Amino acid sequence: MNDDRTRPLEFEAWVLRLKAAYDAGYYRTESAEGEQTRFPWQNRTCGDCPFWAHSSCLVRQARRGARDATCRYFDAWNHAEAESIIQYLKMTPVRGPWTYGEDQAA
């Protein structure tokens, strides 16, 4: 088992390089900086999302600016889930305060 006293110094340098690359927005730390790959969501905003329209998120039904950071539904692998949520929200009737309590017509 390695502890701080037996850990090789090369490990520390590698971790520092990995952290620096991660902080800079890369998820692969190639030795050549030009070959590093950026995170897929980097430099993406709600305005780029297919579920954003008229300053609101169609999935969360919340007001979002075009320059706000994207959520998980931006990623292609989450599109089916987002579409399912949108369909569910369309099917759910909107109930206002006038629907609770006694019938207004009586």
Image (tube, helix red, strand yellow):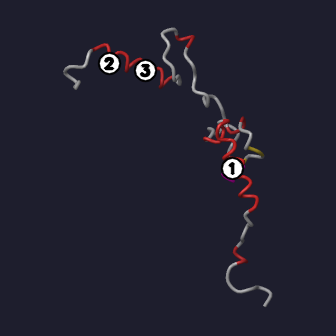
Residue 99 in percent (x, y) is at: 72, 77
| Residue 87 placement: quadrant | bottom right
State the residue position of label 1. 59
State the residue position of label 3. 18
Q: Extreme top residue here?
A: 32
Give the amino acid at mark 3.
Leu
Question: Seen in the image, is 85 located left or right of residue 4?
Answer: right
Q: Residue at x 78, y 46 (%)?
A: 54
Give the amino acid at mark 1.
Val
At numbered mark 1, what does the secondary structure look like: helix, strand or loop? loop
What residue span does the magenta drawing correspond to?
A: 58-62
Q: Nearer the viewer, residue 30 or 56?
A: 30
Give the amino acid at mark 2.
Glu
At numbered mark 3, what does the secondary structure look like: helix, strand or loop? helix
Placement of 74 over or under 19, stated as above or below = below
Placement of 105 over or under 10, stated as above or below = below
Q: Residue at x 67, y 36 (%)?
A: 76
Q: Residues within 10 Å of mark 3 (few under 14, many from 20)?
A: some
Q: Residue at x 68, y 79 (%)?
A: 100
State the residue position of label 2. 12
Tags 3 and 2 touching, CB below 8 Å:
no
Q: Residue at x 66, y 47 (%)?
A: 81
Residue 43 in percent (x, y) is at: 63, 28
Cα separation between marks 1 and 2: 43 Å
Residue 65 in percent (x, y) is at: 69, 43
| Residue 42 placement: quadrant | top right
